[in-house]
Each structure stands twice: as C-alpha cells, then as structure tokens.
Image: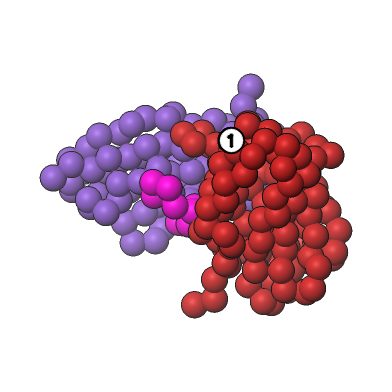
Chain colours: A red, B purple
Amino acid sequence: EPEVTQTPSHQVTQMGQEVILRCVPISNHLYFYWYRQILGQKVEFLVSFYNNEISEKSEIFDDQFSVERPDGSNFTLKIRSTKLEDSAMYFCASTGAGVVPLGVTDTQYFGPGTRLTVL
Amino acid sequence: RKEVEQDPGPFNVPEGATVAFNCTYSNSASQSFFWYRQDCRKEPKLLMSVYSSGNEDGRFTAQLNRASQYISLLIRDSKLSDSATYLCVALYSSASKIIFGSGTRLSIRP
C-alpha cells in the first residue's frame, strides 16, 4: 500500500535555528497538509496546499512558517526561527487522488511524523 | 466554544462491551466528518467516514446528526486492540481545512 513518508523521524534543534521538515506524499495525490501535535494535546491543522499554493492556513501558521513543493515529490515545512513552543510532533498528510473538491470519500493518509524538539 | 468537542475520557470498559462516543461540532458549514484512531505516539489513521444515513463497518457504526450537530461512534464487542484515542474530525466546506477534536481515550481491559 502506498504511504506518506517523513524525514527525519526526530529533529533536535536550538532555539532560533531554522528547521526544514520533509515529507513525500503519495504520488498521485493532489492535496497536502501539515499538522502539529504538542505532546498530550490535540492534532492541530497548520496549512493545506493545492496546485502549488497554500489553500488554507491556521492562526498558528504565522510568518515563521512556510511550505514548499520544490520538486514535484517532496513537500516541506520550514520554521525560520524556532521557539521552545514549536516542540511537537509534525504530521504531513496527503489526499485527493484526482477528486476535486475534496469530498467525504477522500481519505487523508498521514505520515509517521517528525518529532521536533527545540532546546 | 471549541469547533469540535469530544469527551476526553478515559473510557475504561471490559473486553466484549459496547461503547459509544459522541462528538459535537459548532460550525454548520462543516461538510464531512470522520473518525480516526490514534495509538500512542503514532499518526492518526482513518477509521471511517461518517454519513448522514449512518454507516457500519464490522463492529463499528458511525452516525451523523446535522440538526443537532453531533457525530457518534459505536463499538460493539470491543477487543483489547481497540484501546486507542478516537479522534472526531470535521472538514470545512472550503475543502481545505480539517479540524480535529481533542480525542477520546478508550482503554479495554481483559
């Protein structure tokens, strides 16, 4: 079964440093998402991306965050200057194998996550 | 008010029991709904989509009540492997934003 992959599985960084989290969505999918989950808390939507642009973003996704699909297979989340409160599990997801708009039959496939620890 | 609200639990039930979770949503523009399960420190995995007519998948039954803005999940004949956190998810009509509830923790005891 096709799967979403994410690298690295764990990233440790110093406060103020830039990090790039990488995801390879399922190849024929059209919609891509980033979520974060602070330990013990709920999964929070960050951003959705379709047709090479951001479709929707949450209040969490401020100017420190950016997303990119640099080469048609990778989907990246960049945090420019990390803060302690950015420590969380970051999940990438993809969906929409040719179905527009996203409907009830579209399954979101999640990657295994990248655990980001900011010291 | 939270956009998607769930009882956090934990629900602690014996194997073989029937257990039900409810979830309420505040935004009537929400278009589609799902139940996901999440095991400890793992990614969410889709359990089932939720339709107004109700749908069943083996031991699991999901129901949507748009008038009252709630979604339910029923698990029959619960197994030890059902122990997990169950996440209620609403998708907005813009089709680009997905909101997760905080999850309901279920623990099945032998």
Report the amino acid beneath label 1. Answer: Leu
- What residue is pinned by disc 1? A119
Q: Residue at x 81, y 68 (%)?
A: A70
Whether residue B31 appears in this view of the structure is: no
Q: B13 or B58: which is nearer to us?
A: B13
Q: B38 or B87: which is nearer to us?
A: B38
- Asked whether, in this view, residue A49 is left or right of residue B21, the answer is right
Answer with the quarter of the image where residue A57 lies: top right
Q: Residue furthest left?
A: B110
Decide whether the magenta segment is chiefly helix, strand or loop.
loop
The residue tagged with tag 1: helix, strand or loop?
loop
Q: A39 or A106: which is nearer to us?
A: A39
Q: Chain of mark 1?
A: A
Please give the range of residues in magenta.
B39-47
Residue B87 x, y percent position in the rendering: 48, 43
Residue A114 x, y percent position in the rendering: 56, 53
